[in-house]
């Protein structure tokens, strides 16, 4: 029986697992979390009786997918709390859990690792009490915990709006939701809005929740700085011009104990690139993205990608694409024709069409990279400031690999997922609409314990 290893148990990975099992393949599903669902469908532990987070429609989608997965779960070799840290052509996949490590040589690999959040560096963004918006949402979904008593939420796209509404409904005092771009920018693509009308209605519901709670929504505003001696105590917002530069004569200060920000995403594409997959750069869709065909196949034989890790397009696309890629990978291995996927392909096309409209609210104009002062830390893991990066650039270190060797930017715990797009912007003086060469990926791509690497299991297929 052919074996497919699937990395990631979010919507794309779960859907791919279901398709592959139904097609008669053995599935090994690897995920770092303790429970399946990914970020969007994150589940709390069973012993925590906490309210469900999200709209009724989102909760229904979550339950439907998790129920479908439970139907096939007994046929899946499910590996929670396990990290896929290295991938090579072959394919060969290397894993580690808390105590042991293992090499797998499956017949195919589907990478469904999603994205990491991105923030634009600004003064005070490293203070305790400053969260990624998705991180604040994860606390709420998985633990029923609020990031603070009084919270400001800021960023691009629809996520800050959803997080602000969810935190408010859960009991936080949300001081403000500040969006870099007005969401009405999407109205410039009416056909895209029509294609995603169900999601638009959910967005309007979040907007209504904020209005009912009296939360101000500032559109065309961005954070200037987070203030505080030992943790976040206040945040200053200002209106921005068309290039993303602050108009400091139009600013407002909010006293808060937590700030949640999201200014886009970075695709977790390092495993595909480590295996040798070709990639392209798209700053809005997630940075360095593996190139693939409509069935998710990369330039490396028997290695596939699905979901947001192949380009930010949301949970509906990820689930539809996961089923498509799982079926296609299984068909390629077994020689059996894939089932009729016309409906899933239509769902993917419609929601991709909506995502094109949403992209208008995700663009980061060049001026946002001027928010950081020379003293602002850009690489949090290695405490590298913007001034240090610009000094290295002035000395001729004008690639990400060069910056890494000279300043240690990108060498830390996150592997550059937090800082490298910002570092690339500083190299290019804020202009990131052209190709940017990715930093070379080296094993181990994700943090794992040395003790686990030193305690290997026998390799299995």
Image: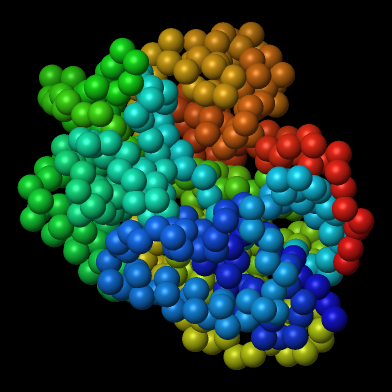
Q: Position of residue 110 (x, y in %)?
A: 69, 64
Residue lying at the far right in this picture: please name it.
Answer: 458
Most foreground residue, 78 or 443: 78
User: Against 235, is 135 above or below?
Assistant: below
Q: Residue at x 15, y 57 (%)?
A: 209
Q: Position of residue 283 (x, y in %)?
A: 49, 43
Instruction: Tell me if residue 297 can be seen.
Output: no
Q: Residue at x 80, y 73 (%)?
A: 3
Q: Position of residue 103 (x, y in %)?
A: 85, 54
Instruction: Tell me if residue 121 can be seen.
Output: yes
Q: Residue at x 64, y 53 (%)?
A: 81
| Left-right relation of 99 to 411 | right
Q: Residue at x 30, y 43 (%)?
A: 146
**Quadrant assignment, res 342:** bottom right
**Quadrant assignment, res 31:** bottom right
Residue lying at the far front in this picture: please name it.
Answer: 47
| Left-right relation of 46 to 98 | left
Most foreground residue, 163 or 154: 163
Q: How is the image coloured?
A: rainbow
User: Against 50, is 263 above or below?
Assistant: above
């Amino acid at each position: 029986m052919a074996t497919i290893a699937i990395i990631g148990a979010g919507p794309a990975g779960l859907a791919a697992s279901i398709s592959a099992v139904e097609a008669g393949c053995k599935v090994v599903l690897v995920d770092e979390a303790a429970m399946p669902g990914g970020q969007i469908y994150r589940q709390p532990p069973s012993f925590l009786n906490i309210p469900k987070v999200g709209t009724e429609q989102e909760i229904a989608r979550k339950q439907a997918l998790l129920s479908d997965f439970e139907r096939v779960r007994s046929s899946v070799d499910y590996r929670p709390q396990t990290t896929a840290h290295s991938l090579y052509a072959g394919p060969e996949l290397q894993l580690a859990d808390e105590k042991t490590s293992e090499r797998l040589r499956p017949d195919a690999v589907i990478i469904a690792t999603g994205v990491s959040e991105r923030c634009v560096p600004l003064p005070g963004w490293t203070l305790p009490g400053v969260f990624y918006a998705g991180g604040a949402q994860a606390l709420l979904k998985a633990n029923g915990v609020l990031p603070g008593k009084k919270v400001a939420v800021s960023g691009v796209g629809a996520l800050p709006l959803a997080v602000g509404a969810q935190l408010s409904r859960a009991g936080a005092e949300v001081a403000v939701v500040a969006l870099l771009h007005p969401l009405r920018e999407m109205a410039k693509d009416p056909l895209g809005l029509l294609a995603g009308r169900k999601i638009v209605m959910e967005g309007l519901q979040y907007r209504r929740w904020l209005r009912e709670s009296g939360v101000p929504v500032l559109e065309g505003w961005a954070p200037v700085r987070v203030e505080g001696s030992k943790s976040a105590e206040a945040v200053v917002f200002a209106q921005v011009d068309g290039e993303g530069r602050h108009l400091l004569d139009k600013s407002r200060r909010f006293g808060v104990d937590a700030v949640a920000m999201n200014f886009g995403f970075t695709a977790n594409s390092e495993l595909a690139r480590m295996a040798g997959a070709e990639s392209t750069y798209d700053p809005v869709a997630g940075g360095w993205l593996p190139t693939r065909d409509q069935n998710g196949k990369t330039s490396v034989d028997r290695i596939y990608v699905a979901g947001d890790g192949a380009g930010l397009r949301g949970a509906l696309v990820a689930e539809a694409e996961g089923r498509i890629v799982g079926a296609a990978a299984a068909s390629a291995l077994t020689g059996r024709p894939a089932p009729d996927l016309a409906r899933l392909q239509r769902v993917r096309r419609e929601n991709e069409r909506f995502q094109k409209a949403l992209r208008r609210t995700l663009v980061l104009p060049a001026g946002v990279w001027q928010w950081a002062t020379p003293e602002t830390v850009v690489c949090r893991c290695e405490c590298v400031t913007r001034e240090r990066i610009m000094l290295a650039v002035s000395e001729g270190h004008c690639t990400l690999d060069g910056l890494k060797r000279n300043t240690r930017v990108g060498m830390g715990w996150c592997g550059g997922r937090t800082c490298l797009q910002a570092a690339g912007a500083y190299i290019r003086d804020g202009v990131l609409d052209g190709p940017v060469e990715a930093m070379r990926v080296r094993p181990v791509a994700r943090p794992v314990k040395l003790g686990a690497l030193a305690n290997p299991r026998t390799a299995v297929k």
